[in-house]
Image (spheres, helix red, strand yellow):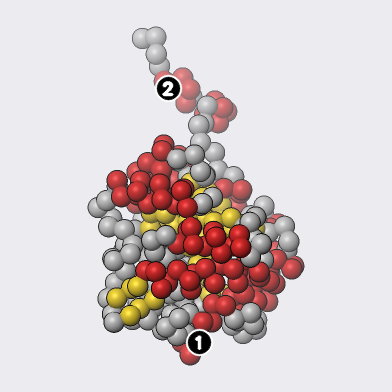
Amino acid sequence: MLQRPRRNRKSQVIRDMVQETHLHASDFIFPLFIIDGKNLKTEVASMPGIFRYSIDNLLREVESCLKLGLKSFDLFPNLEESLKDKTASESINENGLYLRAIKEVKANFPEACVVTDVAMDPYSSDGHDGFVENGEIVNDKTLKILADMSVAQAKAGADIIAPSDMMDGRVRYIREALDENGFTNVSIMSYTAKYASAFYGPFRDALNSAPKFGDKKSYQMNPANQKEALIEATLDVEEGADFLMVKPATTYLDIIKLLKDNFDLPIAAYNVSGEYAMVKAAIERGWLDQKAIAEKLMCIKRAGADVILTYHAKEVLENKWI
């Protein structure tokens, strides 16, 4: 027997030597939830270990992450219902929670990479990612709102704009608005293949951003579809995206690989709230070992992700699981 693959598994030193996929702190973007107020840190009930932070505590959390080598953060606002309206006007309020948070993080930690979310749902009284008219999500009327939101975030200091709305044509519309306002160096990380998934529930709890009616199936992708992701990715590349994102991650590894194999842009994958909650719950009950967390993230990278948005980022680095 000339070939014995086990020879390359016989010791930890050799296993490390031939390991094909590696995880690093630079692979991760850490999503963080923000609330208004002072000295607040409230745990998300459906996401053990994940908190909503007032801006002062957000800065402390970012500082602690930077010390671990975790330098990229995706910020999400939890807003009072009274601030929401049909046109998401709070999203461009310079004195509002979200834009203040971006400014504070960049002012205190200029070395941090701030990724911002572009979608109407956190600010919308309808809870949808697009403008609602007569019970329908109106695509083209949404684009101007998203572009204004993007420019406001860029002015506040965002490094990467991440439109998560799945409206047709929004990448081009946002790119043109950013360029016209002098933000040619601000990147766009497009939610390219964002599926109408059942794994978003804890996130919506964290932000109180669930739709007030219906669902998001008219704009988010059908989980049964694969080729459609190629259509979305082709359009995003043509429209000026700098990153292509797949969401969710672990249940859509085939889509991550599909985009990696067909496009030259960096591929991001969002390891979403439901995927996080599922694993954490199993670990808490003793059904899984905590090593499952690092294995899950390794699988996402092995599938082709260059960047992983994950709520596990900090704990993985704190516990030196990679």
Return the mark for residue 216: none
Indicate the secondary structure of the residue bearing disc 2.
Answer: helix
| Label 1 – label 2 distance at C-alpha | 61 Å
Give the residue at mark 1. 83
Give the residue at mark 2. 6
Q: Nearer the viewer, mark 1 or mark 2?
A: 1
- The reply, left or right, for residue 256 in relation to residue 60 is left
For the N terminus, the quadrant is: top left
Vertical position of residue 104 compared to residue 109: above or below: below
Three-letter amino acid code at the position of disc 2: Arg
> How far across and down, in percent of the image, does residue 310 sit?
50, 57
Number of marks in the rendered image: 2
Indicate the secondary structure of the residue bearing disc 1.
Answer: helix
Residue farthest along the left direction in this orientation: 224
Instruction: Give the residue drawn at x 39%, y 69%.
Output: 140
Residue farthest along the top direction in this orientation: 2
Q: Is residue 148 visible?
A: yes
Q: Is residue 281 visible?
A: no
Residue farthest along the front direction in this orientation: 180
Instruction: Give the residue drawn at x 35%, y 78%.
Output: 132
> How far across and down, in percent of the image, does residue 44 sit?
47, 74
Residue 186 figure quarter: bottom right
Instruction: Please rate how many residues cluster around mark 1, counting C-alpha atoms within 10 Å: few if below 14, some from 14 to 19, many from 20.
Output: some
Relative depth, front residue between 206 and 279: 206
> How far across and down, in percent of the image, does residue 194 sit?
38, 58
Q: Cβ–Cβ below 8 Å for labels 1 and 2?
A: no
Three-letter amino acid code at the position of disc 1: Leu
Give the mark, 1 or 2, whose residue is nearer the N terminus: 2
For the C terminus, the quadrant is: top right
Relative depth, front residue between 25 and 320: 25
